[in-house]
Image (spheres, rainbow, N blue to C red):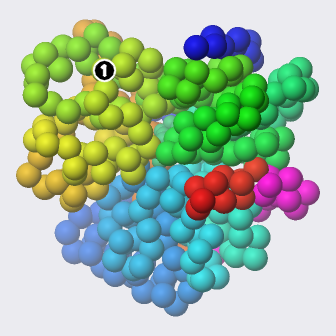
Amino acid sequence: MNLSSTAPSTTSAQPPATATVDACQPHYTGLRRRAMIARIKRLLKERDAVLVAHYYTHQDLQLIADETGGHVADSLEMARFGDRHPARTLVVAGVRFMGETAKILNPEKRVLMPTLEATCSLDLSCPAEEFSGFCDAHPDHEVVVYANTSAAVKARADWVVTSSIAVKVVSHLMDQGKKILWAPDRYLGRYIQKVTGAEMTLWQGACIVHEEFKSQAMLDLIAKHPGAGVLVHPESPEEVIDMAHVVGSTTQLIRAARELPQDTFIVATDRAIFYKMRQGAPHKRFLAAPTGGEGATCRSCAHCPWMAMNGLHNLEQVLLRGDNEIHVDEAIRIQALRSTRRMLDFAGA
Ligand code: 13P
Ligand code: SF4
C-alpha cells in the first residue's frame, strides 16, 4: 500500500457548543408543536416547496420531510433528490454546503435554508484561497474534495464525493494510475487510503463531532456489550474506525442497523441518526459511542452544533418570509458544477 504524504495546511475552527446552540432554540411540545408542524406542512404546499433534510437535523424536521413528499437522506441522496424533484423551491435543512450543492446543481430553483449560519468545521478548515495554493503545489494530482466544502473549493476540484461513494471514486481513479489530492477531512482521507491503497496527499481538516469519539472509552463500552454491532462514520478517528463492523455514510449505517443480525448497536456518528435507526429497527437498541473518556468533556456530545441550528421556528420563518436564500456566484457555480455533476453521474452509473 502506498503511504500518504500530508499537507501542512489546516485552519482550526471555533465551533459553538451544541448545548449553547440548543439553549437558544425555541422548543415546542404538545399542542403548540402539532399546530406548528401543521402550519409548516401547509406553507410547503402553498409555496410549491419541498423539504430535504439531513438525518442529523431535529426529528420534527425529518418527520415533516417524510410526511410531505420531501426526503431525509445522506448528503449524496439529498443532492440527487433536489436535482430530480420538480418543485420550484427547495428548502434544505442541514448545513450550508448542502444548500450550496443544491444551488450548484439547480440554478433555476430557489434554495432556502432555515438558517444561513449553519456551517461545518470541514468547510471552515478549508478556505478556498489556501486550498488553491495546495492544488497549485501538486499540479500532477487529481483533485478530489469531500462535499463538505464551499462552492469555491468545489470549483477548484476535479471531483466532488460524499462518504457513500468516496472509496469507489478513488478506486476508479487509482485504476487509471492517478495520484490524488484529497481535502478536507484527514480521517476520511486516511480511511479511503487504507481501503484502496491509493497514493493520496491529505489536507488536514477534521469534523469536530466525529473527532471527539474516544477509542479507549469505546473499547470499554464494547467490553460491556460484547454482542453489539459497531457502526462508524468514516469521519471518526482511525482507531475508532478499526473497531467497526460497518463503516459508511449515514444512509449506509442506517441500512446496516436494520439488516445486521445484532440487536444492540454502538453508533459512532451524530446521535440524531437514532430517529431513523429506531424507525427501521424498532426492537433494537442503539448506544451512542462515547465522546469523552474519564474526566473528559465534549463540545458537541455527538450532535453537530450547526445541524442543531435548524428548528421548527426558523423553518416556519423561512417559509413565511422567503429569505435565507442561497446564492452562489455564477462563475464559481459553473466551475463547481463540473466536479459536482461528475459525482452524480458516477453515482447514477
Ligand atoms: P453523510 O454524507 O454520510 O450524510 O455525511 C455528511 C456529514 O456531514 C457527516 O458528518
Ligand atoms: Fe460538518 Fe461534522 Fe457537522 Fe457533518 S457533523 S456537518 S462534518 S461539522
| Vertical arrangement, residue 161 with respect to residue 229, above or below | below
Residue 17 vertical placement versus 348 (above, below): above
- Residue 264, quarter of picture: top left
Q: In the image, is 74 to the left or to the right of 179?
A: left
Residue at 68 percent across and 31 percent down: it is: 174
Which residue is outermost to the bottom?
46
> Which residue position is annotated with label 1?
243
Secondary structure beneath disc 1? loop
The answer to if 55 sits in the magenta stretch is no
Q: Position of residue 110 (x, y in %)?
A: 69, 74
Q: Which residues are magenta?
A: 320-338
Work out which quarter of the rendered image holds the N terminus and state it.
Answer: top right
Asked whether residue 42 is in view, the answer is yes
**Quadrant of residue 313 within the rendered picture:** bottom left
Residue at horizontal 44%, vertical 20%?
237
Front residue of 283 and 98 = 283
Is 173 on the left-hand or right-hand side of 163? right
Quarter of the image with the C terminus is bottom right
* Residue at position x 68%, y 20% in the image: 199
Q: Position of residue 285 (x, y in %)?
A: 13, 42
Kind of residue at badge 1: Met
Depth check, front residue: 50 or 296: 50
**The residue at label 1 has a CB less than 8 Å from ligand 1:** no
Q: Quadrant of residue 216?
A: top left
* Residue at x-position 81% and y-position 28%: 141
Q: Magenta segment: does it hold 336?
A: yes
Can I make out residue 306 in this image?
A: no
- The x and y percentages for residue 95 are 56, 50
